[in-house]
Amino acid sequence: MSPGPENAPTSPSTSPPALTPARPGWWRDAVFYQVYIRSFADANGDGIGDLPGIRSRLSYLADLGVDGIWITPFYPSPMADGGYDVADYRDIEPRFGTLADADALVDDAHRLGIRVVIDLVPNHTSNEHRWFREALAAAPGSPQRARYLFRDGRGPDGASPPNNWLSVFGGVAWTRVPDGQWYLHLFAPEQPDLDWTNPEVHEEFTSVLRFWLDRGVDGFRIDVAHGLAKDPQLPDLPTEALNPEGTAAERWFAERGRHHPFWDRPEVHAIYREWRQELASYQDRAESPVARGAAEPMMVAEAWVPFPDQLSRYVRPDELAQAFNFDFLECPWDAGELRGSIDRSISATSSVGASTTWVLSNHDVQRHVTRYGGGRVGRRRAQAAALLMLALPGSAYLYQGEELGLEEVVDLPEEVLADPVWERSGHTDRGRDGCRVPVPWTTTGPSLGFGTGPGWLPQPPAWAAQSVAAQAGQEGSTLELYRAALRHRHAEPSLGGGTMRWHDSPSGGLVFSRGADLVIAVNLGDQPLALPAHRGIVLASGPLDPHGRLPVDTAVWLRTAG
Ligand code: GLC
Ligand code: CA
């Protein structure tokens, strides 16, 4: 299917990619854009986003001004969990494209100065991975089973699961196989957990890292980075810590000075040290794309831990480069809470010499326009939050569609829900599909320019007015605000890395300076705020009031020196 003019792909590569040598630690102030591949752009009209679709939209991302993209899993997968169930770590899911498409995407991105981070899923494979098929075909106690966590059950016939752990997606975390043994899956039954005490598992993933580094990728997002190590005894969880919300179980353990049996165990760090060494040695090898001038590869952890100091252990100098800052993401729209989170985050990461990240949304959480109240209020706050986030020292992660101010789609018809959470929760939790609805690119068409046919999830009709085409060039649109913020961020030496200094501010206000000449003010209170002394406005998330004050739910970047 040939894309229309609006969807015209960037021209295919004819010469080797021009890789700009990267500064050491290039990621420390980079702005990354998360591409949830199924929902970004569909080049062949089958309703599912794909690699050629991403390729066709790279110029949009370059115009937006991002430094890198993180692409969610594109590997062959039965899609029990949207691709986070990987059947082969060295290939591409046919619905998403081919290895040649991936290579072309990396080349095109590099030519546009965009780094490419891919998703590594090391906690579990798909149940259709060759290893798991071999494990099922082999006997209990075999080396094939030892790559996973197979155990005998409890009770007279071993008919009860080996312990009381529950799956993150609901239900028991164990599934029984015909010969009577059980295997562990912290997520869906189609996602059996690997046994990271097995050296073969280590070798396999080191080899997978090399496979993708050889293809020129610039980094890896590490899925469930806090889950790889399990207490070898596989002990029952105390009832108090059995089925809590979010990270409450880990809090329960942390407050008692104990380690949770599967979250954030100290053993995971040896894995990241091993990978860091692999990346460093890779960089030294003359034939590697990295040594040819591409960026030094980075790794970013997805680790849901209750305290920022726990998170900082993942980014010690010999471990991963970054970790997503979920403490910040989980903050309500409240000046005191946000200030506390910003301070905690900066102090924890700087204690180990790492840069901080800032994240407001991703494919697993409710979109922040909705979290901040939804509708006009939510969107105003989200625009102010974007100026806050992009002015903070460190690196930022944007989630596709946040630059359009998209809201969570809360009313998807039940029959289209695809997140395993919906089934596993016995239809009590609708899951994460509401933040995964395909991106609207144009004001018309069966999927608003996402593809030539309907998308795998329906978009609200109101999204036509929020599409890229509707917002591009429109003053005051969320898209133009993000474009301007990223443009200024690149141009201003005071933004990106560096430090920040808080100023006194009335309650409900957040005021801080960056470098010698910028002050940022955010009004999270219920009264207009007098602007701090300044020489000019660099950027504002909305108009000032008639008295020149900063209205409620608005943020501004001010120039303070000439
Ligand atoms: C991570 C992913 C999420 C996935 C889970 C299991 O949390 O972000 O989407 O369901 O891991 O792989
Ligand atoms: Ca497609």
Image (cartoon, helix red, strand yellow):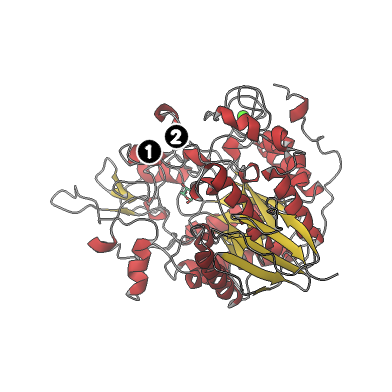
Q: Is residue 433 left or right of residue 146?
A: right
Q: Which mark is residue 422?
A: 1
Percent x, y for residue 50?
63, 34
Q: Secondary structure at mark 2?
A: loop
Q: Residue at position x 82%, y 39% from top?
A: 13
The structure residue drawn at horizontal position 75% and vertical position 39%, both measured from the top left corner, is 474
Q: Position of residue 341 (x, y in %)?
A: 52, 67
Quarter of the rendered structure image containing ligand 2: top right
Q: Is residue 558 left or right of residue 355?
A: right
> Which quadrant would residue 538 be assigned to in this image?
bottom right
Q: Are marks 2 and 1 in contact (CB under 8 Å)?
A: yes
* Residue sitting at x 59%, y 55%: 552
Label 2 to label 1, Cα distance in Å?
Answer: 7 Å
Residue toward you, 59 or 204: 59
Quadrant for the N terminus in the image: top right
**Does dot 1 land on a helix, a strand or a loop?**
helix
- Residue 397 percent location from the top left of the image: 62, 54
Judging depth in this view, the residue of 543 and 16 nearest the camera is 543
Query: Which quadrant of the rendered structure holds the C terminus?
Result: bottom right
Displayed quadrant of residue 393: bottom right
Amino acid type, mark 2: Ala
Query: Dot 2 corresponds to which residue?
Result: 418
Residue at far bottom of view: 351
Would you call the spot at circle 1 few (<14 residues within 10 Å), some (14-19), or many (20 or more)? some
Q: Is residue 97 visible?
A: no
Q: Residue furthest front?
A: 547
Residue 11 higher or lower than 62, as above or below: above
Crowdedness near tag 2: few (<14), some (14–19) or many (≥20) residues, C-alpha within 10 Å? some
Query: Vertical placement of 328 versus 439: above or below?
Result: below
* Left or right: residue 437 compared with residue 28: left
Please give the name of the residue rendered at 59% of the width and 54% of the height, measured from the top-left corner.
Answer: 553
